[in-house]
Image: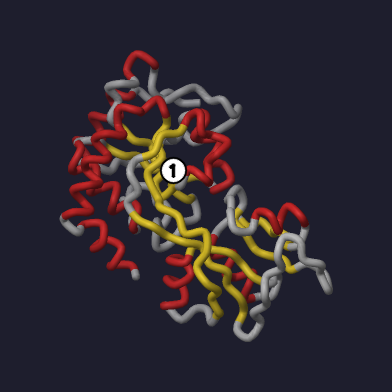
């Protein structure tokens, strides 16, 4: 596994791109407890945020990562604005959603943007959170004219349980009890775009997905679905590894400024 020297990484970041720097070739997460990127002696001075982004993209929140190019989407634009306010730099670490836990535990990535503590309860010991910067919700999505009522956790089923497409590794507070009792069957999928495709193909009965994401794809005319009511509405923050605890206060100050001057609202508006 290649060693990354924080000083060299930081110098390259500022010289080449200002806030955003290209992906270092270090995302091999085997063994699970990989060597830390930043040595203990310089953790407090390291100002590089290694941010998890989706390897396949998560439009419009992020559009994945292409070597030699800046990441685009809502979250990268917010990160760029934060870096300009704080003097930090950020590096995209492109991983499958199911490996975000492994990467955070090993500190291959030390920041996750757009997160709620309820989603990461198994990592509470290594997680700190900024102030929320937005609120979003999940939504159940059905094929046109194929909507059905959800069973309650204790309801008796009149037929086989409905299959709900989900993202592997994601937690859905409003449906966890039905999944646990078998009233609904969870079908894990790797990416949001694939969720939409398997629903359109009839391979699942419904999917649960970020409302902003499905509206983005439907706006382009690619799918004709019915949406249920928003659910699991939660405030979203930036999750920071405890080794970067110093970063929470400056990020909070910068988020306050970006909310006050309308920057965050303008970024979201571009993609709605």
Which one is nearer the viewer's eye here, 77 or 64? 77
Which residue does the image show at 27% across and 34% down from the upper left?
A: 249
Image position, residue 207 (x, y; %): 61, 67
Toward the left, the furthest residue is 261
Report the colour scheme: secondary structure
Which image quarter: residue 15?
A: top left
Q: Residues within 10 Å of mark 1 (few under 14, many from 20)?
A: many
Image position, residue 17 (x, y; %): 22, 42
Which one is nearer the viewer's eye here, 267 or 9? 267
Image position, residue 236 (x, y; %): 40, 51
Q: How many marks?
A: 1
- In this picture, is 233 found above or below 46? below
- In this picture, is 49 found above or below 255? above
Q: As drawn, is 41 to the left or to the right of 199? A: left
Q: As drawn, is 54 to the left or to the right of 165? A: left
Toward the top, the furthest residue is 41
Image position, residue 263 (x, y; %): 21, 57
Which residue does the image show at 27% across and 39% down from the upper left?
A: 251
Toward the bottom, the furthest residue is 145
Which image quarter: residue 6?
A: top left
Q: As drawn, is 243 to the left or to the right of 264? A: right
Which one is nearer the viewer's eye here, 268 or 137? 137
To which residue does mark 1 refer?
A: 52
Which one is nearer the viewer's eye here, 123 or 42? 123
Quarter in which the C terminus is drawn: bottom left
Q: As drawn, is 38 to the left or to the right of 199? A: left
- In this picture, is 52 found above or below 43? below
Toward the front, the furthest residue is 154
Which residue does the image show at 30% across and 27% down from the upper left?
A: 246
Which residue does the image show at 77% across and 66% down from the upper left?
A: 155
Which element carries disc 1, helix, strand or loop? strand
């Amino acid at each position: 596994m290649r060693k990354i020297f924080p000083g060299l990484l930081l110098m390259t970041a500022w010289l080449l791109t200002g806030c955003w720097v290209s992906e270092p070739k270090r995302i091999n997460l085997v063994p699970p407890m990989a060597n830390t990127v930043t040595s203990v002696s310089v953790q407090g001075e390291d100002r590089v945020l290694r941010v998890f982004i989706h390897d396949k993209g998560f439009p419009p929140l992020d559009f994945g990562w292409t070597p030699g190019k800046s990441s685009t989407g809502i979250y990268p634009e917010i990160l760029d604005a934060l870096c300009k306010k704080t003097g930090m730099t950020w590096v995209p670490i492109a991983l499958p959603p199911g490996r975000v836990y492994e990467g955070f535990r090993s500190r291959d990535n030390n920041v996750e943007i757009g997160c709620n503590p309820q989603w990461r309860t198994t990592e509470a010991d290594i997680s700190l959170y900024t102030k929320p910067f937005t609120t979003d919700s999940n939504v159940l999505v059905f094929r046109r004219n194929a909507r059905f009522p959800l069973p309650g956790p204790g309801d008796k089923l009149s037929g086989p349980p409905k299959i709900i497409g989900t993202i592997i590794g994601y937690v859905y507070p409003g449906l966890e009890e039905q999944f646990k009792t078998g009233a609904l069957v969870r079908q894990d999928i790797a990416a949001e775009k694939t969720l939409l495709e398997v629903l359109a193909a009839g391979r699942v009965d419904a999917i649960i997905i970020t409302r902003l994401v499905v509206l983005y794809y439907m706006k382009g005319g690619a799918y004709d679905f019915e949406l249920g009511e928003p659910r699991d509405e939660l405030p979203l923050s930036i999750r920071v590894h405890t080794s970067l605890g110093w970063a929470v206060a400056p990020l909070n100050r910068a988020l306050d400024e970006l909310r006050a001057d309308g920057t965050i609202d303008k970024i979201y508006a571009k993609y709605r």
